[in-house]
Image (spheres, helix red, strand yellow):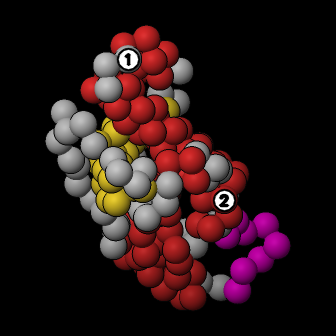
């Protein structure tokens, strides 16, 4: 969809007179955003009741974006073996979710907590008005890790720890 709109705008712009100093240029998404929007990676979901799955559900009321990111963890190694997402939002939110799931796979839990929204935004070349999308992705990763840790604490019989992890 984004690619189609971009193509139409480019064709219309080339048919017009040369661009003058007061004409506003259209804003285009970076090719990585278009790629992750057109071909999102890891779309879907896991069973949220699975004790090896952590679920992070975050939203931005200002723009209406909602992101659910889930991680599946190998309990023996603590490594994230798979990730899935479902996002309701703009192309930048979908691309940020897709990138986040790619980046967390194969990493230790501690490693993924170091993924920052600025890294996602830089990778996708997001403009300032779309930075909230990468912030949602970072928040979703942290929420998924906290959810997994709370489940793990509950399974291991430490209810105090699970309530602290859920509150954090």
* Image coordinates for residue 8, horizontal then vertical, percent: 43, 78
Q: Can residue 139 be seen from the camera position used here?
A: yes
Closer to the chain start, of discs 2 and 1, is: 2
Q: Which dot marks residue 119?
A: 2
* Image coordinates for residue 156, horizontal then vertical, percent: 32, 26
Distance from disc 2 to disc 1, alpha carbons, whole Å, reads 35 Å
- Compared with 99, 7 (above or below) is below
Left or right: residue 118 versus residue 12 is right
Residue with the mark numbered 1: 158
Q: Can residue 167 be seen from the camera position used here?
A: no
Q: Residues within 10 Å of mark 1 (few under 14, many from 20)?
A: few
Q: Is residue 161 magenta?
A: no
| Image quarter in which the N terminus is found | bottom left
Q: Main secondary structure of the magenta part?
A: loop
Q: How many marks?
A: 2
Q: In the picture, residue 13 is in which quadrant?
A: bottom right
Q: Nearer the viewer, residue 44 or 4?
A: 44
Residue at screen point 58% across, 53% down:
111
* Image coordinates for residue 26, horizontal then vertical, percent: 61, 68
Q: Residues within 10 Å of mark 2 (few under 14, many from 20)?
A: few
Residue at screen point 42% across, 50% down:
78
What stretch of residues is rendered in magenta?
18-28
Left or right: residue 44 versus residue 168 is left
- Compared with 5, 166 (above or below) is above
* Of labels 2 and 1, the one closer to you: 1
* Image coordinates for residue 17, horizontal then vertical, percent: 65, 85
Q: Is residue 21 magenta?
A: yes
SS for callout 1 = loop
Q: Which dot marks residue 38?
A: none
């Amino acid at each position: 969809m984004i690619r189609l709109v971009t193509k139409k705008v480019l064709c219309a712009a080339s048919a017009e007179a040369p661009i003058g100093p007061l004409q506003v240029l259209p804003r285009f998404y970076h090719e990585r955003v278009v790629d992750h929007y057109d071909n999102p990676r890891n779309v879907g979901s896991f069973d949220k009741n699975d004790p090896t799955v952590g679920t992070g559900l975050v939203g931005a009321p200002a723009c209406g974006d909602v992101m659910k990111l889930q991680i599946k963890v190998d309990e023996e190694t603590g490594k994230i073996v798979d990730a899935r997402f479902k996002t309701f939002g703009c192309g930048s939110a979908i691309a940020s979710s897709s990138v986040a799931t790619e980046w967390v796979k194969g990493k230790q839990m501690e490693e993924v907590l170091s993924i920052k929204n600025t890294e996602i935004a830089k990778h996708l070349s997001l403009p300032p008005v779309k930075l909230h999308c990468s912030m949602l992705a970072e928040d979703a990763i942290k929420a998924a890790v906290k959810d997994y840790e709370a489940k793990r604490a509950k399974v291991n019989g430490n209810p105090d720890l699970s309530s602290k992890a859920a509150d954090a």
